[in-house]
Image (cartoon, rainbow, N blue to C red):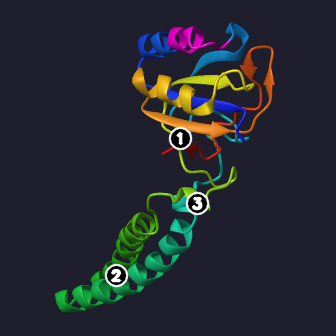
Amino acid sequence: MPNIIAARFETQADADAALNAVRAAGIRAQDATSFYVNPPGQHALYPIGGDAHHDEGTKHSGTAATAAAAIGSVTGLAIGTATGAALGEPGFTAAGAIAGAGIGGYVGSLAGGLTGSRAGRPGHATTEEPVGRSSGVMLAVHIDGSVPVDEMVRVLRAHGALEVESAQGEWREGTWADFDPRRTPDRIA
């Protein structure tokens, strides 16, 4: 059974209204808190910035970019060589080959990187390869059994929660101490 129910709200005013309703439903002040969740990639959890080396949806984009760059370079080399030879000057043949290979490689890597990227699948996500959590104001409620989970979900949704999730987490001194924005939410349907 989850010990934390959390919901995302678009505005602080919506979250504050829901916080008041949660407290009116019987949740103690130290068992509910709100905080802002930054957009994906803006949590600075990775040593060189960002949240992870790559997310679940882009883990294959590097391989796809490399393969497409090789194909693009070879294709560009052939087209550049043919174009340079058609112009009739020996210098144009070499310049056309080099330019064609460079342009073909660039276009190929761009196309390959884009085709290798897709929307991440939450079921395949890990904290090392996350699926980005939407930003907004998060209202987290520690459930200690005094108020049923179903009642808490109903109150949150009645006050405009965009998403409601359940979690097992560490609640300490009125906050969700081990909240990780990279963790894929376990959404409540």
Q: Position of residue 14 (x, y in %)?
A: 42, 15
Say which residue label 2 marks. Answer: 76
Q: In front: mark 3 or mark 2?
A: 3
Instruction: Write the residue at 73% across / 33% down.
Output: 3
The image quarter in which residue 109 lies: bottom left
* Three-letter amino acid code of the residue under disc 2: Gly
Q: In front: mark 2 or mark 1?
A: 1
The image quarter in which residue 157 lies: top left
Say which residue label 1 marks. Answer: 133
Neighbor class of circle 1 (other Cα within 10 Å; few <14, some 14-19, many 20+) is some
Q: Is residue 112 left or right of residue 166?
A: left
Q: Is there CB contact under 8 Å for labels 2 and 1?
A: no
Say which residue label 3 marks. Answer: 123
Magenta-colored span: 19-27
Q: Position of residue 78 (x, y in %)?
A: 33, 89
59 drawn magenta:
no
Who comes first in sequence, dot 3 or dot 2?
2
Who comes first in sequence, dot 2 or dot 1?
2
* Three-letter amino acid code of the residue under disc 3: Gly
Q: Secondary structure of the magenta portion, mostly?
A: helix
Q: Position of residue 164 (x, y in %)?
A: 51, 35
Instruction: Write the residue at 61% across / 40% down.
Output: 50
